[in-house]
Image (cartoon, helix red, strand yellow):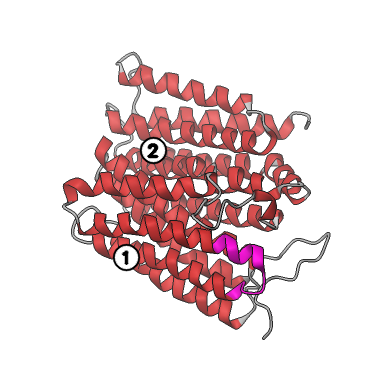
């Protein structure tokens, strides 16, 4: 039988297939669902629930991206497997808004089906690759164990579900860090994860584009239903410029340098685990929170900014800047100090607004956050590259 694994050519990086781009469409819907959930429940509890669901959605996507890093997506069995995962992902996305209500079991079963089914498929697809097969034997053990928590949480009373799903996420996210250590199978070594770094970097970049695109969708849909007054036009412009600045900050020189660095690294698996598996979730959360903040500003651009508006409008860009600096640290071992400075400035302004020291309208808060992001984007584009 023809191998389902990619044929790696030294000096060339694997091309992202059209079926992978098609697969990503399901997650456009998922990100939109999470944004709307946070807009409707702008409370600390609502934020925590959104974080849990985002972490689960990201985990479903990034694991599949790791799998397609090894598999040849032009093979029919691989494409069929992706279509099945898409169907389960669509069910999972439908269950997101009421995951902590009446559809908790629907969400949990779809999530577990994706992870367990994907691992089983990889065991079959990689049956002739002993190292890869053993890796997915370990991964299957961990996904089956965490799956118990997901399903039990889906059945449990909604008051207890949050804590059970937090335990499930703890198991999920501990797996890669602990090398998927399993009884009788030992621990995996990142040196054995023959990852195609440039392909994985491109895949994560595409997910960031999904989130930025969702920001534009939410902003455009809201603006279309509002009267075109000067404040709403200014709010729309500020939102658009924020999205442009985030795109530039992510896809500037640092992104290309990171992609090249991991492509030529001796232990690409270790860098991929840090920089493209764990770190992006922070940056992505910042984009989603920023989209929620844009919605709040468009709805009420003038007047007093309530606490949840301040947290979203200034907190979203601050989280994005911290996440992008964290990603740089995960690749090169050093923080992006200019982005940390921008993050600190936004946090200080948010604290001043929350304590009553800065009486600014939501529109002014949005304009200031946009100015900070744009200034950083221009600074990094013009300064000498090291």
What stretch of residues is rendered in magenta?
A: 125-136
Q: Position of residue 96 (x, y in %)?
A: 31, 58
- Left or right of 3, for residue 351: left
Rendered position, 154 above or below 40? below
Tell me if residue 228 can be seen.
no
Tell me the SS state at disc 1: helix
| Residue position for label 2 | 230
Q: Residue furthest front?
A: 184
Looking at the rendered image, the quarter that the C terminus falls into is top right
- The nearer-to-camera label among 1 and 2 is 1
Which residue sits at x=44%, y=23%? 347
As helix, strand or loop, the secondary structure at mark 2 comes to helix
Query: Against 285, is 384 above or below?
Result: above
In this image, 151 relative to 133: left or right? left
- Name the residue that disc number 1 marks: 109
Cα distance in 3D space between marks 1 and 2: 48 Å
Q: Is residue 59 visible?
A: yes
- Quadrant where the image shows the N terminus: bottom right
The image position of residue 187, as x and y in percent, is 57, 51
Name the magenta segment's main secondary structure.
Answer: helix
> Which of these two is toward me, 200 or 191?
191
């Amino acid at each position: 039988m023809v191998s389902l694994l990619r044929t790696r050519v030294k000096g060339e990086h694997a091309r992202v297939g059209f079926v992978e781009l098609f697969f990503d469409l399901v997650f456009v819907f998922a990100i939109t669902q999470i944004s709307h959930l946070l807009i409707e429940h702008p409370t600390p509890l609502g934020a925590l629930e959104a974080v849990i669901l985002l972490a689960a959605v990201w985990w479903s996507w990034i694991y599949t991206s790791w799998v397609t890093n090894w598999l040849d997506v032009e093979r029919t069995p691989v494409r069929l497997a992706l279509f099945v995962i898409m169907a389960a992902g669509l069910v999972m996305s439908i269950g997101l808004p009421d995951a902590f209500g009446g559809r908790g079991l629907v969400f949990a079963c779809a999530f577990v089906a994706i992870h367990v089914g994907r691992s089983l498929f990889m065991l079959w697809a990689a049956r002739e690759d002993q190292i890869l097969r053993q890796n997915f034997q370990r991964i299957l053990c961990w996904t089956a164990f965490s799956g118990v928590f997901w399903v039990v949480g889906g059945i449990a009373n909604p008051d207890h579900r949050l804590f059970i799903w937090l335990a499930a996420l703890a198991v999920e996210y501990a797996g890669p860090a602990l090398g998927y250590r399993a009884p009788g199978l030992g621990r995996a070594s990142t040196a054995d994860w023959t990852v195609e770094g440039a392909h994985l970097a491109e895949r994560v970049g595409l997910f960031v584009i999904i989130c930025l695109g969702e920001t534009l969708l939410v902003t455009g849909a809201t603006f279309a239903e509002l009267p075109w007054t000067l404040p709403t036009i200014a709010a729309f412009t500020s939102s658009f410029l924020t999205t442009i600045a985030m795109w530039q900050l992510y896809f500037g020189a640092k992104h290309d340098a990171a992609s090249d660095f991991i492509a030529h690294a001796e232990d690409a698996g270790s860098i991929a685990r840090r920089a493209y598996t764990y770190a992006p979730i922070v940056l992505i959360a910042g984009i989603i929170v920023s989209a929620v903040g844009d919605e709040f500003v468009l709805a009420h651009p003038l007047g007093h900014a309530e606490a949840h508006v301040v947290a979203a409008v200034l907190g979203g860009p601050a989280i994005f800047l911290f996440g992008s600096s964290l990603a740089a640290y995960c690749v090169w071992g050093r923080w992006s100090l200019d982005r940390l400075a921008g993050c600190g400035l936004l946090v200080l302004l948010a604290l001043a607004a929350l304590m009553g020291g800065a009486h600014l309208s939501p529109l002014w808060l949005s304009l200031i956050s946009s100015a900070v992001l744009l200034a950083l984007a221009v600074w990094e584009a013009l300064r000498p590259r090291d």
